[in-house]
Image (cartoon, grey):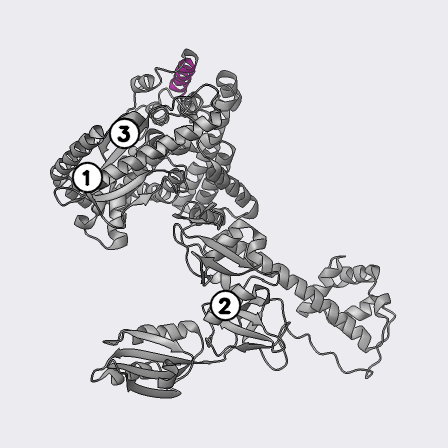
Amino acid sequence: MLRNVHGMEHLRGLVAERPEAERDLIERAYDFAREAHAGVVRKSGEEYITHPVAVATILAELGMDTTSIAAGLLHDTVEDVDGVTFEVITAQFGPEVSRIVEGETKVSKLSKAGSQTAEVSDDGRDMQAENLRQMLIAMTDDLRIIVVKLADRLHNMRTMDAMPPEKQKRISRETMEVFAPLAHRLGIGQVKWELEDLSFRYLYPEEYAELRSRLRMQLDERDGIVKQAEESLRSALEDDLELPDWVAAIDISGRSKHLWSIFGKMRREGKALEQIFDLMALRVILTPRRVEAREGTDPERLARAEEMREKRICYHTISIVHSLWTPLPGRFKDYIAVPKPNGYQSLHTTVIGKSGQPIEIQIRSSRMHEVAEYGVAAHWMYKQGGQLNQRERDQWIDQLRELQNEVGDATEYMDTVKNDFLSQRVRVFTPKGLAISLTAGSTPVDFAYHIHTRIGETMVGARVNGKIVPLSQKLQNGDMVEILTSKNGKPSKDWLNFAGTRSARTKIRYFFRQDERLGALAHGQQMLERYLRKRQLPVRKLMSVKKLEDAAQKLAGSRNPDELFLALHAGKVTTAQAARTLDPALAVKKGTAAPEQPPRSQGRPESGPPTVYVDGMSTATKLSQCCQPIRGDQIMGYLTRGRGVSIHRIDCPNMIRLLADEPERCVSASWNTRSEERFEVNLDVMAPDRDGLLADILGILARNRQSPLRFEAFVDAGEAAHICLRLGFGSNPEMNSLLEELRTVRGVEEIRRTRGFGQTALYE
């Protein structure tokens, strides 16, 4: 945890090794801030200058550059002090310091306004959202602005005791939702953990106090086990014959798990405190020896050798750990080969110590530890030991910039940032091994649109780890994802129900808006052309560009003919009105043609609404008998030769084969949610034979007003009872609801949808 020191002496000690010019800049910034804030006190009763000094101290502890530390000392001067302007800051401390101070000032002004509004009106959430939006916009210009803001928020969280409880909760909630996840995405682990624990203290005071008390009661016992494990591991590493040749220094220390992390794990997994494996932990930090360069060695080759040594010592150390203690199966995580999205690298394993207690061990190099603790701040560290890989972090900043242009509403913007950018992440891979970071809960649809909009728009299926999967399947860490595309492929509106990111949903909606607009334009134009031809009127003459523009101006208020066609499609303008406007002298004789019918809605044949829509096509469809899809199932179509489109469930074996063999004939399809058609489904309910089983199942059917269309019961050679039912459902959710209730019947082991009905169908 960062040290909470408010005086300048500690800050001076932290910057003592910096050049004299830099130390002088910090002293001048301190003198300026002290004079500017003279006579002002905080709610705690302390002099106000203690706050900017504490912020600067946190920045120095993070290893930030001198410019950031000076900005931390000055961050409140322009806002709070008359006569201090950005021009004054620029003149005395330079444009870089001024830019960071200006970014902080803009955010702080909005923050205070939002705080005041939140207390008196319902507009507070909008103002708070605008505050956070402006902060993120400023961050995309210079990441140091957000690091200073995080230091500012951390010190404010440390000193909230003097605030009213409702304000403590509001600030803590904002911290938990935005600032702690932001610190995590930037890789600043020290700040993230402390912000979470401080927020936990104010949001759940009783749970916080109880958990802290229980951990303190077990502290001596845990410390003894950890110390014994530390001594054993240190001895094993020092006795190793190879490691000393590669490692200059080994640092082993006990690591305490943070309160909010423990509480979250207990609540998320329903575990007691005693069931949390990693309460006791050791962290091993290895400083590799420099690789000796031979004369004429290429610098890039030397850098690769340094990187390989760094990884080699970590993997060698984990082998020593696993030879010393028994590892718990499934508890080894390799974040060196597959780093976290924020750049975090480390090896994690959980072993059974000599006392029989599980101990988590983390192994990383000194550089990896620097990135884990300081994250993006490591870019500005005074003693920087090399450039960090910033591709994903830079990509994230670029996405934030794009989002600013896409979303105008501040509240919607912040909801998107929280859900898509600051939430938990999963890392998946393209078939070529490129790592892609996505929001947890993302599906192949989100993956496809993340790669490229065109990939999403032509997607017809997906393989995950070599297997065809439903597009609604949630992706897990380490999944290999391959998107199957077809030139005839189009998005389905069903995708909106399970796409996990706002970005993908926005692109899907935009496609359908554009698709519907094109269809409406074509329909409106065809309506007008049919009307004119039916009356043997000169279509080409009357539908010249000039005449259409004039008619559009009069009837639709725009000189764009598209607006006229859209109005015709929507029924706002009749074809007779349009014809008379195109040629005012035109006399349409009564009785020469059948009276004009009001325009029908597009895509609705006279025989009634279709059960399934095939995107981009108007053709007959048939529900396949091999998988018997019902409304709500994830479906795709196969363009047959002469028999229209056959509709299959996405997990149908035949559909999987067709996707692999003839992807160009596979098309997207979606259900007509307004259709009231019911679907017949064959079910096989299997359970050990017992008295009353049939009565229990029929009782559930009766309560759900389900009367079997067909019914059969028998016992197979293995003495398992099979109750075969043919039932009618309007949708998949209706069927699933009944199946969930049937699964509660005592003894029911499996319920299957079958192609045919009864005993014969089970053995086809």
Q: Which residues are magenta?
A: 22-36
Disc 3 to disc 1, how far (Cα)?
16 Å
Q: Within 10 Å of the Cα at label 1, are there few (<14), some (14-19), or many (20+) other Cα atoms?
A: some
**Circle 1 sits in a helix, a strand or a loop, which is it?**
helix
Badge number at residue 243:
3
Residue sitting nearer the eye, 602 or 39: 602
Percent position of residue 357, x then y: 15, 45
Q: Within 10 Å of the Cα at label 3, are there few (<14), some (14-19), or many (20+) other Cα atoms?
A: some
Label 2 close to label 3 by CB (< 8 Å): no
Badge number at residue 657:
2
- Residue 147 belongs to the span the image colors magenta: no
The disc, 3 or 1, on the residue closer to the chain's N-terminal end is 3
Amino acid type shown at disc 3: Leu
Residue sitting nearer the eye, 379 or 516: 379
Characterize the magenta stretch by its predominant secondary structure: helix
**Circle 2 sits in a helix, a strand or a loop, which is it?**
helix
Percent position of residue 259, x then y: 24, 42
